Amino acid sequence: MGEVSRGGAAAPATLPDLPGLRVVVAGAGTAGASAARFLAAHGAVVTVADGRPASGAALADAGVAVVSVDAAVADLRADLLVVSPGFRPDSPLVLAARAARIPIWGEVELAWRVDASGLLGPRRTWVVITGTNGKTTTTSMVEAIVEASPHTVAACGNIGLPVLDALTRTPRVEILAVEMSSFQLHWAPSVVPDAGVVLNIAEDHLDWHGSMDAYVTAKVGALRGPIAVVGADDPVAGALSATTPGARTIGVRVGAPIGDDIGVEAGVLTDRAFTAPGESPRTILPIDDIRPAGPSGIVDAAAAAALCLAVGVDIDAVAVGLAGFVPGRHRGETVATLDGVAFVDDSKATNPHAAHASIDAHERVVLVAGGLLKGAAVDDLFAATADRLAGVVAIGTDRELVASAIARHAPAIPTVTLFTGDDGRVTATPLAPPAVDGLATAPSDGVEAARAAARSAHEADTRRSDEAPAADRVMDAALVAAWSMIESDRAAGGRPDAVLLAPAAASLDMFAGYGVRGDSFARAAVAIGATPAGPSDSSVRR
């Protein structure tokens, strides 16, 4: 098996002596608490700025003082400010630190400097994964691949485990698979990964960054190392390249590899990037063995393969790791089946870009969408995927925005909006678009299918006598309506393969999180007679 390699020396980023260092940590969440505990354990004098009452009790055992953010701003005495990802560059505490010329690091920047300093032994191998969508899946794939090799690995960063906690794990971690959000990249300017990837870039978090240019600039931080991997099919990411002179840029794509790319040839994921001079392209595994299925899953797998090959993991481990990989919950997860139709929970598809990729993984679906769009437009989503949609059930606060976009761009698609009224009952309203010429399915058929779906949802909810939460009642009615659309599409000669929850929106208007939304979808599928999926059916495969 190959040896783990690092592309070069650590970036010239120093770590000050920690004993006696006065550090303010902004935020007592997972990342902030990890930083505070680590620093305190190494002799720093740590104050955490956080307004939540429970924060002090949680950190009391570490000898860390907790004050409000306002108090920290009013009396900022520190040698270093460590900010959690949620703190924007224009937040009062950050502005106060800048005015006082206090260095500002994110928790990943701190971890990088700790690792590079040798405080915890020889520097680890860092691979950094970012993108608007697909970060967690790709990071998890990297972890699965390295676990199939002789090397030790930790998936960390934005995925949940703080990088500092990964650095202090026993047994010692050799390879860090670091998922990084744009926020974390902004606050980690010294990180130079041994290999990094930008999977894709679509408008997101512009309120935090201030502009699309600033958002892209943050993402490009993943490409500062000797191997820069980009999603070649994405119009923004595909135009990026390594930022270090002499570094390599490698594309990953759904189609055939071009030059030093990893892509698909004859249905097989193929490596042309890491072959020896004169060596033939190397096959990795058939794309039918990649989960989640579809273009986004293939690109994620190609990116994970590129990162692992870049740092010396053997190609056999890449094949084994990807073949055995099972996506995390609520990420293209098949939760039930009924009469040959899969019920697919992609509740993590919380923006239009992710929903588009989810729809593209199927031939024809009834889509359950809606929630909090947070200003995101869905016009392009429905214009681009109309030929794959057998129907749409729109739920949540922004359901009418979803319905309006469909009426403008794909009026033939049967569409129903659902919400609960003051009496707690679910109201189902079919979209009635104007006639449109030249479509495979006549608008009148679509209207009738929408009306039938709305009637089915209304009748099913009317028969209920339980006291289920309003959100669950809406989801139950949504799947009754969706199944009615499946039957109407089949009667018209269609061949739908899935009822797909890919909301393109956040969940907090109705649910406590995207996971709770996905669980509600799974229960609703079983409630209409679908068979729950077993462990081997936990992701979409075609």
Image (tube, rainbow, N blue to C red):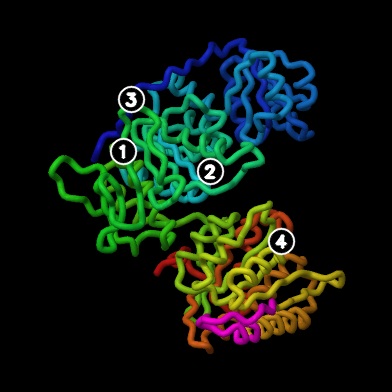
Ranked by sequence position, the earlier of labels 3 and 1 is 3
Magenta segment boundaries in residue numbering: 431-448
Type of amino acid at the residue the image marks with label 1: Ala
Image quadrant holding the C terminus, namely bottom left
Which residue is at 41% across, 67% downward?
541
Q: Find the distance from the CA under tag 2 to the CA under tag 4.
A: 28 Å
Q: N-terminal of the two: label 3 or label 4?
A: 3
Name the front one of labels 2 and 4.
Answer: 4
Q: Which kind of residue does numbered mark 2 sit on?
A: Ile
> What residue did someone put label 3 on?
8
Going from the N terminus, do you reach mark 4 or mark 1 first? Answer: 1
Q: CA distance from mark 3 to mark 2?
A: 26 Å
- Judging from the image, what secondary structure is the residue with disc 3 in? loop
Mark closer to the observer (3, 4):
4
Label 1: how many Cα within 10 Å (few below 14, some 14–19, many 20+): many
Label 4, on which residue?
398
